[in-house]
Image (tube, grey):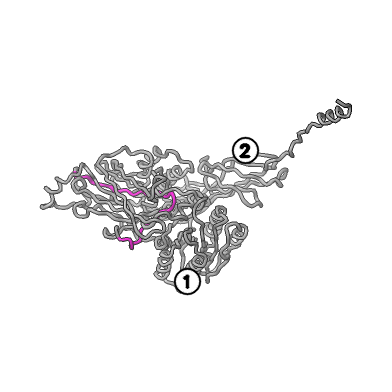
Amino acid sequence: MTRSLVRSLLGVALIVPVAVAPPRTVAPPRLSGTIVAAAGTPLAQARIGIRGQPGGAISDAAGAWALTVPEALRGKAVVLEARAIGYQPSTISLVITGDSAGLRMVMQPAVVSLHEVVVTGQAAASTRVRLGASTAVVGGAAHAPAPVRAPDRTHNTEAYASIAENAFRSASDVPLSTFGVDVDRASYTNLRRMVRSGQLPPVDAVRLEELVNYFPYAYDAPAADSRDPVRFTADVAVAPWAPQHRLVRVAVKAKEVDTRRIPPSNLVFLIDVSGSMQDPLKLPLLKQAYLMLVDQLREQDRVAIVVYAGAAGLVLPSTPGSRKAEIRAAIEGLEAGGSTAGGAGITLAYQVARDHFIRGGNNRVILATDGDFNVGASSDAEMERLIEARRAEGTFLTVLGFGMGNLKDSKLETLADKGNGNYAYIDSPLEARKVLVQEMGATLLTVAKDVKLQVEFNPATVASWRLLGYENRLLNDEDFRDDAKDAGDMGAGHTVTAFYEIVPRSAAIDPSRPVDPLRYQGDRLTSIHHGGELLQVKMRFKDRDGSTSRELRTVVLDQPVSLRGDFAFASAVAEFAMVVRDSKHRGSASLEAVLERAESARGDDPHGYRREFIEMARAWGALTRGVAAPDVRR
């Protein structure tokens, strides 16, 4: 080997790559902690952020929160601020040096005075009540005040449709029950808002089925290879408030859809910017809600924004979801003022949706308002006919209600029903996230249309029956097979629960409906047992783009199961609705029984919805014991 070759090889051998450490990446500082009320209980739905900075976080049901701080603030003094409805702002001053965990913020109730409150149903020793830092003295007893802002009851113009509660019907005389499913949940959140505000709700604001259906349940979905978009089961237990009766549950589940794979959306945001929307719980909260939805948009989705006040106008033409900055800017620039021309707004919104219609896509108008359509050439009937016509063309309607004191609940529910859509009431950023993020598929994508249920009762085993709730969804029996008859619609992943209370023929005659013994049916009926069947349940539905319905059916035997899990929790919510409404069919129903059963059946509660229900039920009980507002129940 030559000397030069050796030198070359040595040179090569000496060239060793040196690992160069990549530049060290420093993660932005992160703050986290909990927020509690003065009594030490976790406070949900509080907004936490750095004063003067955009963004922030919202505390969950356990009061926990976490947020990332911009790197530009490292080493600087900042003020961390928490705000919640009904509480005084809470702040912490700190210097951002890195991550900080375990920050605990305590919020004090806002001090509000209520003068000369009329106390009903109590032998009151005092009728002057002060809420806030002090206690409320009613009937000579002291009660801890609800930490809420007092509503302005002097200008309350909220409107609710009258509900005539379903009565018991004789299975011999009326063997069929037919209704359209209901997936609206607005009644529950509206009730929650009232209780938090220190109000006892009017009975017509309490729609039992919407309280029950607010909560997700672990029902069996259609099999992956099933052509049916919905599936249902039915079972029976002993009625908790009437042990001699049966409680039948019909549980419906729509198929799950990956929201990343749903058809492209052609959305029109129809936003009320009239003067009635200036309240912080209206337009400001509405903006937060729509911005959450914008974050979920994909490139193939499109959004237009129509607003209405004294007149209707197009704020943003139909824009691809990839241009989120433009959509956000249009939403954030909205301001409230003027009167309300709702009819003109709906007309324009549907026209924009029609101009950009996506065949096979999700074409939908999303209306956000307090429902005060007080100016405009269009009558309610004309608006409803327009919505029905556009529904037939394939453009559906979702309605979001906001605010208090002026909510036109009955009108908003009607519009959603006419538009093959759903109606939700948004009372907080957390509720907006639930409706428009966590349940976006269910809210925006219809998978089954005109879903109807029909139950046939076996008069050999059933003396009488009663449907719990669904009073405004009842159908004629002949409507069940009539595909031209509109009924309820279900979105992706939706669950629907319906309860029937059954008086078995073996039990005592229902005292609420005494009848003379039947002369000609007794012998015939006792021979028709069908193996101990209580009833048969049938369901009809159409596919999302279909026009012909299909049918599923099952039979329920008189074989009660243990009341536990989802069945037990849903029955507790139904019992609570009967207690709040002071139903004449409540039997032995009580708040104590509601709380005990709901607590025992809380189970896996990842979002805290069930715990929140229990807390809300307790708060309602406190209001009834120490009334801090006029008793508005009938």
Identify residue type, mark 2: Ala
Q: Which quadrant, please, contains the C terminus?
A: bottom left
Question: Is residue 537 rendered to the left or right of residue 488?
Answer: left
Question: Is residue 391 rendered to the left or right of residue 290?
Answer: left
Image coords of residue 297 (percent x, y): 55, 55
Image coords of residue 140 (percent x, y): 41, 46
Q: In front: 532, or 288?
A: 532
Identify residue type, mark 1: Val
Query: What residue do we see at 66% from left, 44% from top?
Result: 93
User: Would you say residue 216 is visible in this rendering?
Assistant: yes
Going by the picture, which residue comes out furthest to the top?
1
- Secondary structure under tag 1 reads loop
Image coords of residue 542 (percent x, y): 37, 56
Q: Is residue 533 magenta?
A: no
Q: Which residue range is magenta in the image?
A: 482-505
Image coords of residue 593 (percent x, y): 35, 41
Going by the picture, which residue comes out furthest to the front?
1
Q: Which quadrant, please, contains the N terminus?
A: top right
Q: Is residue 488 magenta?
A: yes
- Secondary structure under tag 2 reads strand
N-terminal-most mark, 2 or 1: 2
- Residue carrying label 2: 101
Q: Are marks 2 and 1 in contact (CB under 8 Å)?
A: no
- Residue carrying label 1: 375
Mark 1 is surrounded, within 10 Å at the Cα level, by few (under 14), some (14 to 19) or many (20 or more) other residues, namely: some
Q: Quadrant of residue 393?
A: bottom left
